[in-house]
Amino acid sequence: MKRKVLGKGIEAIISNHSTETSGRAIVELNVEDISPNPFQPRKTFSPEKLRDLADSIQEAGMIQPVVVYKKENKYYLMVGERRWRAVQSLKWDKIPALIKELTIDEIMIGTLIENIQREDLNAIEIAEGIETLMKKNNLKQEQASAKLGMNRTTLTNYLRLLKLPEVVKTGVLSEELSAGHARPLLSLRNHEDMRMIFSQIVKKKLSVRQTEALVKNFYKKDKTTGQPYDPDMQKIENKLTRLLSTKVKLKYSRSGTGKIEIYYSSLDEFERIYNRFLKE
């Protein structure tokens, strides 16, 4: 099945503009004269992948030039930041480039679309890119979705991720958890609860489905104790009951404090449990 193309992308945008230099499609620019794209939504670059790219460039040369635009006598990257970074590590003085005349609107939209098409961005970077586009151009969600060629609901779902606490957003950026893990957290009541679930996801390496179940039951109370429902604590309670052959109850709170209650029906049973602990 052919994947639906988002927007018209950078290639379609830059193909409609002539280069600044007449008669030359590609020029050689000083590497140090080029700056990163200030509207680049991508925040992280894998050092390993950059090393691999640098090795490839060193062996085969720069097959595809970077694309830059000029603003106030300075060059800024439009396409090819990974290549530019790789070339820097190789200590190259010059880099082949195409110079294009583009509006800020075209730069922001094209950069965001290109990254999404190449799947170079995670969900938080996409959300931040959309938000920046909307603020810089004073766009509403409907206008932004039309410019990006993105379904309105999809765009809204991305923007909702920005309501997550910083630690969770950082977790998505660092790939500690996926957007699929993060989205269910938005149904929780506050950031404290979101952070608590996030720590459990990371610590227990929960799947998306397990995360959804944990969030769904987060505010449910145990019918007998009135405590917050926790399936893991319930398993521990059952295990202790079997181990000691008597009723055991765990009293606990969301903050991590609590106590263990061990029941006995006679002094003989108390002595049995007591001796069991001494042996252990």
Image (tube, rainbow, N blue to C red):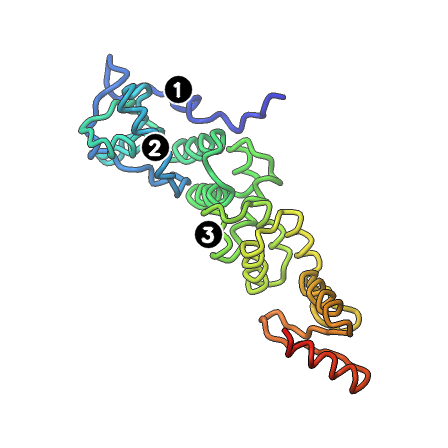
Q: Position of 264 compared to 174: left or right? A: right
Eyeballing the image, is 249 above or below 10?
Answer: below
Which amino acid type is marked by label 3? Answer: Thr
Q: Position of residue 213 (x, y in %)?
A: 69, 53
Give the mark, 1 or 2, whose residue is nearer the N terminus: 1
Eyeballing the image, is 198 above or below 50?
Answer: below
Which of the numbered marks, if any, corresponds to residue 170?
3
State the residue in front, 174 or 267: 267
Q: Position of 57 compared to 245: left or right? A: left
Q: Which quadrant is the C terminus positioned in?
A: bottom right
Observer able to see residue 203: yes
Which residue lies under the disc numbered 1?
Answer: 16
- Label 3 vs label 1: CA separation? 38 Å
Q: Position of 46 compared to 2: left or right? A: left
Q: Nearer the viewer, mark 3 or mark 1?
A: 3
Which of the numbered marks, if any, corresponds to residue 82?
2
Which amino acid type is marked by label 1? Answer: Asn
